[in-house]
């Protein structure tokens, strides 16, 4: 009991405000990266789905590279490596570097999720659209993509959760997000256990909130498909 | 009037349609029958350009197109003036019954929302599904889906409606409700080209029976003539095996 009142709670009172400061950075970096990755992922998915010349093979290599190498290496290469060979990369803002790396990495996964979802839409939906004279664009935006969204949402939310967790790698380039704050505090206070259990709780709460949002969205897009 | 001239279609080396000539008069019901895999569905799908014919021409009253040199605009005209009822209904899964009917009207025919809705409700009433207007396809029975599909095909006010085995995917007890709707349309002189395996229905609804085999039209005759006194040997054999 003494431990709780004499050690843990006072330390928590000191650390939590710092973690909250880090929380906002985690949220804004993850949110920016997520939005970018969905946009980029959709474009990549469409290129792959319609097998657009020249671009489609490039996308394939892109997806293969970003899925096949660790994010940490991608981040180090971008933030520490490229400035040595490219002059304009010198003094690149670190928050932006992390956002871009997370987005590029996650877009590779999201494009696969979206492509799979588009392919899960029944061929008959295309035929009916064409038979009734819908343009290609109308067919995709009004019929196919709304149906694909249902299948794409669970894996895309998973990707979002991955982004939040992977954003903790920003600590390695000196970003003061939840992980950055925790690491700094652990190093100065030597309260490693207390620090990381609180930091874990912060990430966990984010994940639970996200799961709740996912359920809400799913209920909304699923209305058409419930018996 | 719809007129096909020398329509041919190959899938690889397999000639599915061989120089088909066919004229369909306005207000008449033509029923295509024949063994499976003889090109009946392909014929329908070529008229709607869901399959690209290898050669041939098509006429719809004043409109004429050659499949060898058909333009995007001509394909669009063809699709707006013919409409399709699919075997599996292919209703838009993300749209309600009513929206399934109004979507082609607002998107393709550029009608106003309210105008399209009025037509949609009228037609749902006609196929007996007015109370299901806000239901999504997932909650409709197979027969109800087909009836919505028929309403959707009627709504665009086509020159001809093409039915691709409209009852083949249905449970037996749901077949009748769909056939009744089609019979009603026949009474009102809707021009229709129907592919079906329902012989009794074919006999009662058709103005003309088209018997197809191996990509050819073997015999075209009135239902009375065809079912009681078929001219061709193949027709006789087919009827013997299908009517028992």
Image (spheres, coloured by chain):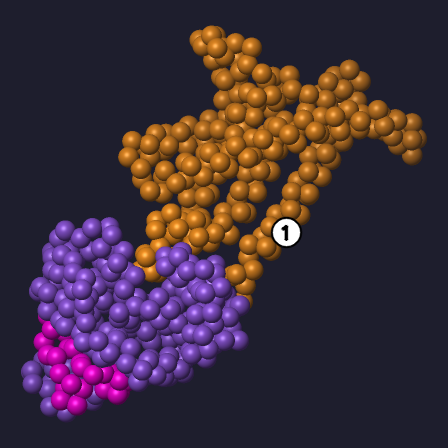
Residue A197, percent from left and from top: 75, 31
Q: Chain of mark 1?
A: A
Residue plotted at (39% across, 57% down): B110
Front-most of residues B158 and B232:
B158
Q: Does A142 sit above or below residue A156?
A: below
Residue bounds of the magenta highlight: B200-226
Quadrant (top left, top right, bottom left, bottom right) of the N terminus of chain A: top right
Is B223 part of what is drawn in magenta? yes
Is B164 part of what is drawn in magenta? no
A165 relative to B150 in the view: left or right: right
Query: Is residue B137 visible in the rendered structure shown here?
Result: no
A221 relative to A140 in the view: left or right: right
Residue plotted at (60% across, 50% down): A217
Residue plotted at (33% across, 76% down): B167
Residue B63, percent from left and from top: 19, 62
Extreme residue toward the bottom, this view = B228
Judging by the rendered image, the residue that carries numbered circle 1 is A216
Q: Does B182 sit above or below residue A101?
A: below
Instruction: Find numbered disc 1 in the image and state the secondary structure of the residue it sits on.
Output: helix
Query: Is residue B234 visible in the rendered structure shown here?
Result: yes
Front-most of residues B114 and A148:
B114
Colour-to-chain, purple = B
Colour-to-chain, orange = A
B220 relative to B198 in the view: left or right: left
């Amino acid at each position: 009991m003494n431990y709780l009142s004499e050690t843990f709670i006072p330390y928590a009172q000191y650390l939590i405000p710092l973690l909250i400061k880090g929380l906002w950075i985690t949220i804004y970096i993850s949110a920016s990266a997520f939005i970018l990755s969905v946009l980029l992922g959709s474009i990549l998915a469409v290129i792959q789905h319609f097998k657009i010349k020249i671009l489609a093979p490039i996308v394939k290599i892109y997806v293969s590279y970003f899925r096949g190498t660790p994010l940490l290496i991608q981040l180090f290469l971008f933030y520490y490596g490229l400035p040595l060979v490219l002059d304009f990369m010198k003094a690149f803002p670190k928050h932006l570097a992390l956002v871009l790396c997370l987005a590029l990495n996650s877009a590779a996964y999201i494009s696969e999720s979206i492509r799979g979802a588009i392919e899960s839409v029944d061929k008959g939906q295309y035929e009916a659209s064409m038979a009734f004279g819908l343009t290609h664009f109308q067919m995709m935006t009004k019929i196919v993509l709304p149906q694909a969204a249902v299948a794409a949402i669970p894996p895309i939310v998973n990707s979002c959760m991955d982004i939040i967790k992977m954003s903790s790698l920003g600590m390695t380039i000196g970003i003061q997000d939840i992980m950055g704050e925790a690491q700094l505090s652990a190093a100065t206070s030597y309260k490693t256990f207390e620090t990381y259990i609180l930091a874990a709780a912060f990430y966990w709460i984010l994940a639970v909130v996200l799961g709740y949002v996912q359920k809400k969205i799913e209920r909304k897009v699923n209305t058409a498909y419930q018996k | 009037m719809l007129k096909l001239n020398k329509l041919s279609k190959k899938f690889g080396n397999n000639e599915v349609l061989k120089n088909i000539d066919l004229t369909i008069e306005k207000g008449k019901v033509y029923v295509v029958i024949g063994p499976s895999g003889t090109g009946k569905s392909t014929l329908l799908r070529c008229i709607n350009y869901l399959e690209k014919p290898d050669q041939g021409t098509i006429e719809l009253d004043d409109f004429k197109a050659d499949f060898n040199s058909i333009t995007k605009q001509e394909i669009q005209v063809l699709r707006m003036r013919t409409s399709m009822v699919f075997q599996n209904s292919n209703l838009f899964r993300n749209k309600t019954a009513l929206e399934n009917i109004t979507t082609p009207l607002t998107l393709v025919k550029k009608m106003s929302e309210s105008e399209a809705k009025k037509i949609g409700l009228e037609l749902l009433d006609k196929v007996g599904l007015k109370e299901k207007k806000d239901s999504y396809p997932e909650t409709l029975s197979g027969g109800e889906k087909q009836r919505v599909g028929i309403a959707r095909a009627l709504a665009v006010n086509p020159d001809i409606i093409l039915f691709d085995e409209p009852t083949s995917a249905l449970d037996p007890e749901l077949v009748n409700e769909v056939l009744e709707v089609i019979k009603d349309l026949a009474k009102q002189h809707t021009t229709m080209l129907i592919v079906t395996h329902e012989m009794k229905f074919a006999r009662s609804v058709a103005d003309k029976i088209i018997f197809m085999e191996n990509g050819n039209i073997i015999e075209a005759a009135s239902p009375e003539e065809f079912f009681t006194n078929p001219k061709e040997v193949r027709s006789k054999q087919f009827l013997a095996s299908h009517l028992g």
